[in-house]
Image (cartoon, helix red, strand yellow):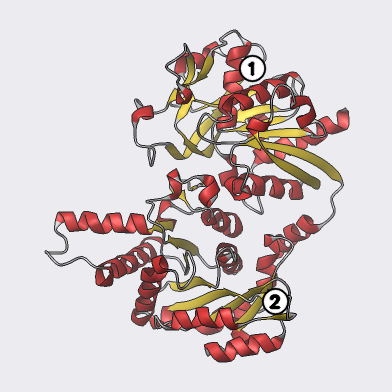
Amino acid sequence: MKTKFIFTTGGVLSGLGKGVTAASVGNLLKAQGFNIFVLKLDPYLNIDPGVMNPLEHGEVYVTSDGGETDLDIGHYERFIGIKLTKESNFTTGRIFTRILEKERRGDYNGKTVQIVPHVIDEIISIILNLAKQKDPDFMLIEIGGTVGDLESSPYIYAISKFASLYPENVMFSHLAFVPYLSASNEYKSKPSQVSISSLRSFGINPNLLLLRSQEGIDTSIIQKVSANAFVKPENVINIPDKANIYEIPLFLESSGILQIIYKHFKIDKPIDYEANAPWKEFANKYISKRCKPLNLLLVGKYTGLEDAYLSIISSLKIASAHQNIELTYKLVDSEKITSDNINSELDGYDGVVILPGFGVRGFEAKVNLAQYTRSNKIPTLGICLGFQAMTVAQARNIGITNATSKEFADQSREQEFVLTPFYENGDTMNIGGTLRLGEDKIKAKNGTLAQEIYGKAVFYERHRHRYEVTDKYRTLLEDDEFTFSGIHPDLNVAEICEVKNHPFYLGVQYHPEFTTQVLKSNPLFDSFLAKTWENKQNK
């Protein structure tokens, strides 16, 4: 078999950064000319993250083919610079569904369906089929959760069996935490040793150990863990906390991780140490002090967890680094902005981003905010529900005072729906898997800001929404200032709205954050920051 498999597991506790670490490995291998594919196996029973509350699990990341996936898929795409698919993320719920469908069809010939062998073999089948379809040089497979979790056990069992079938093609990388005890002023290796022992109970001994810690740990700790894990000391890398995640690939490269991988797989190819020069250049930009300070207000619904808007925040940070902008921002719940305090809440901010979301809570506040920033010439970018709030604000500006979205239908009062479901009867469908999802084409009108931003008439962006501008209102809402400057060229669906004679007032129905890459930010974020800086200079 051509493909080499690197399995990443985590120990001690969650949130150590398995996704970022594995993405960093992918970044380094891609820079060396290898073809990469990624698979994330999540142990929860949801079919996908699509209906999960963002405060529960962070944002839902959408792939170009319409997969609603774990946010780690975003790290992989941004770091490695590749397009992944809905096949890059499988959950236990999705795997169980496949198995139960087979059972109903009689595919198991009347056998009792069990975790072993049927679930285990289904996991192995998924891995092998993807390797055959995608034919990558390296397939990076991240096992969600923590070793020792009950729900993760089938995956650990499966990859152990996989390694017994293809021993020459498999490498196990284990990321574990070494905690610091302030009372005794020392780092403790025992939790990492226990997590490795749990792995060994499944027949897995790591080939590469990555030890996370708050600060650098002493070599004696590395030697102790190495001895207890039966891993060579040179195959143990300590990863202390870094100022930002973009330093991780460079740190791992300097720590010799490519040499470890090459040696394990007997790769007879020289390492090009200049291959990642563009990434090093970006990392230097990111940590450098910049000379253009901008302060943004990000207004949304799930502001209790930054990961709920991870790709948007990452896109703004990446674009600001490329443009020498020193970015600061604040996440604010839209419900906290009222007509009484809007002046004070927006004081000191150079621009506003009206964030995506679902549900009625906070929507009226977003509409009021859109009206305020338009009237007061404050640079504003609206994304998805932010675009819809801008559209409703325009409808009310031209006299449709009861305008709203059908998403917020209230039988107790008369309403005019300027936004209706994309699919017929879409508001009566199941919640999960029934949105407009994935990449689609958009055509920008000539002479508009949208066309200026993208530099071409037709381009592609990713979508995740149920409601869109009703066809009759696509023309009725336009006037001398407000226009729908981007549409789907075949369906005539509104994709972009903008206002003339304004520093920057533009909303998009799609999600530009899902096409940002570290080395190439989405032009919409570039333009928003540039126009906001220009407006600040002109005040």
Residue for badge 2:
181
Work out whether mark 2 precedes mark 1 in sequence or the reverse, and give the earlier one: 2
- Marks 2 and 1 in Cβ contact (< 8 Å): no
Give the residue displayed 56% in from the left and 10% down from the top. Answer: 400
Residue 379 appears in the rendering? yes
Give the residue displayed 76% in from the left and 37% down from the top. Answer: 530
> Horizontal and vertical percent for residue 44?
41, 58
Q: How many marks?
A: 2
Identify the residue at the far top of this view: 399
Looking at the image, residue 220 sits to the left or right of residue 431; the answer is right
> Horizontal and vertical percent for residue 362?
59, 30
Looking at the image, residue 18 sits to the left or right of residue 537; the answer is left
Looking at the image, residue 192 sits to the left or right of residue 118; the answer is right
Vertical placement of 241 versus 164: above or below? above
Towards the viewer: 491 or 362: 362
Towards the viewer: 484 or 332: 332
Residue 457 appears in the rendering? no
For residue 482, which numbered disc appears in the image? 1
Tell which tag, 2 or 1, sits nearer the viewer.
Answer: 2
Vertical placement of 49 versus 506: above or below? below
Callout 2: SS:
strand
Q: Amino acid at mark 1?
A: Phe
Vertical placement of 47 versus 507: above or below? below
